[in-house]
Image (spheres, helix red, strand yellow):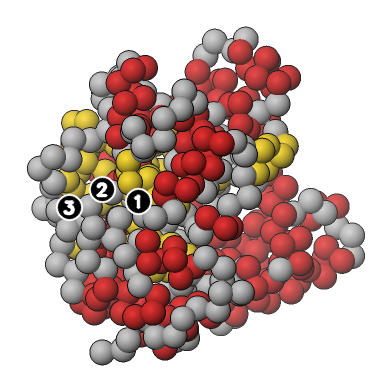
Amino acid sequence: MSAGLHGYVGDIPYLRDFKPMLAPAWLDHVALCCGVEPPARRNGFTWCDLGCGQGVTAAILAATHPRGRFYGIDAMAVHIDHARRLASEAGIGNLHLDAVDFATAGRCRLPQFDYLVAHGVYSWIDAASQAVLRRLIDRHLKPGGLVYISYNAMPGWMPDLPFQRLVHELGRVGAGDSAARLAAATEVIGRMAAAGVPALARSATLAGLAAQPQDYPAAYLVHEFMHAAWRPLYVTEMRRAMAEIGLVPVGSATLSENFDALVLRDAARTLLAGIADRDVRELLRDFFLDQRLRCDVFDRGNRRLAGAERETRLLETSYALCRPAAAIHYRMTTAAGARGYDSPVARAIVAALASGPRRLAGLVPAPDLLEALLTLCAAGEVMPVEPGHAPVERLNRAIGQRLDSAEEILWLALPCGTAVAVDRELLRALRRGTKPDGRRFPGWRDFLAAHGVPAQEGLPAQ
């Protein structure tokens, strides 16, 4: 995963971003939703990010899970250098980082892991590197552990296959670094699209570049499209590959996709009910969803949970709001269309969590409590979190110091084991130690205070 390594482009660092679905509590929630026992964490746990990029996710999770041991592996030395500096600035002592490729990592003294995650890696590397990655997982997955792998999926990427091929081939013969070659390639492709080239007419990326270019920074486009091995996968291909090391699918870290009733229309559900083979059924399901990115969770022989135990453990999990209560509109849009979930019990859950993370068992008595809770999670309004309260002041101070710099991170760590995306102007107010503008950022002051991040104290520089 560096320049010249099996065709992976590595001269431009990737984005500095946090992925909430890689958090242990989130992955545990996926397992419980799907009736699978998650890792036992009574005596701590181990977690590893294979292809950790700039290490923002690994650093935030390590800081907010002081009883866990965290590892990050990435072959781009510039990524690991950034992660180490962030960990040092934030005083994170439970994060081990290695600038090695997967083959070399296999020879390192790595422990057995409760959680192994690989986000945005698998469908961007060649078949030989994928096999090395699978062997690494096979060797280091602890019994009862969980594996997360995201990958570009078919058929959703089909309209962008011509765009990617052109970016790669034009970039291959271009001049300058990857960013310069990307800019030249997209300029040519844009002119081709304007000339009416049929193969580019349905490209979602071209449409996005034209409508909202700010959402497509060069660091994303280079790492998404310029690699020689880039190839979206059908879910059956991935499941066959994971079966070779004894892994079986649990569910999706994209929480809504674990519930057919939320994402599929009646006709699709009726047709799929007649497909006996689980993997083929999932393939057909991806066609209905026009699946573009899969975030799959796997296990290897974990205990299956009966209905009552599953429900009990889900309600014993701690949950938190993902945003201020005033920003929740009780409506989501999926492939099945718009769906409302405004109900007294949903509003009671939101009201209970407005004062901070907590368990809901016994707090909001209602026969449909679990259904409402899972719907709120699937809609991205509520998230599973840790029951403890980790110190995050030093980490958030380090994040505040980077604001408006080349290494800006637009997230704030929360003491409950995750982070929340924050508007740049809001972060500026916090760094200044001033109260956020209540009209521009309604509810954010109380939201952060409920999470133990008092807005009025700001994020002062050291």
Q: Position of residue 16 (x, y in %)?
A: 43, 70
Query: Around disc 3, counting alpha carbons within 10 Å, would you say few (fewer than 14), some (14 to 19), or many (20 or more)?
Result: some
Whichever of labels 1 and 2 marks the residue nearer the N terminus, that label is 1
Q: Position of residue 268 (x, y in %)?
A: 69, 22
Circles 3 and 2: CB atoms closer than 8 Å: no
Q: Disc 1 vs disc 3: Cβ atoms closer than 8 Å?
A: no
Q: Which residue is mark 2?
A: 387
The residue type indicated by label 2 comes to Pro
Q: Which image quarter holds the C terminus? A: bottom left
Q: Residue at x 64, y 57 (%)?
A: 164
Residue visible at 42% across and 88% down in the picture: 432
Residue 79 visible, this orientation: no
Q: Secondary structure at mark 1?
A: loop
> Would you say residue 113 is visible in this rendering?
yes
Secondary structure beneath dot 2 equals loop
Q: Position of residue 108 (x, y in %)?
A: 15, 54
Hey, what amino acid is under mark 3? Gly
Query: Where 412 sits versus 261, above or below?
Result: below
- Using the numbered discs, state the Cα–Cα distance from disc 1 to disc 2 in whole angstroms: 8 Å
Q: Which mark is residue 68?
A: 3
Looking at the image, which residue is at 50% across and 18% down? 278
Check disc 2: other Cα within 10 Å, few if <14, some if 14-19, many if 20+.
some
* Closest to the observer, 207 or 448: 448
Q: From this view, report whether residue 274 is shown above or below residue 156.
A: above
- Regarding mark 3 in the picture, which secondary structure is present there? strand
Real-space Cα distance between discs 1 and 3? 20 Å
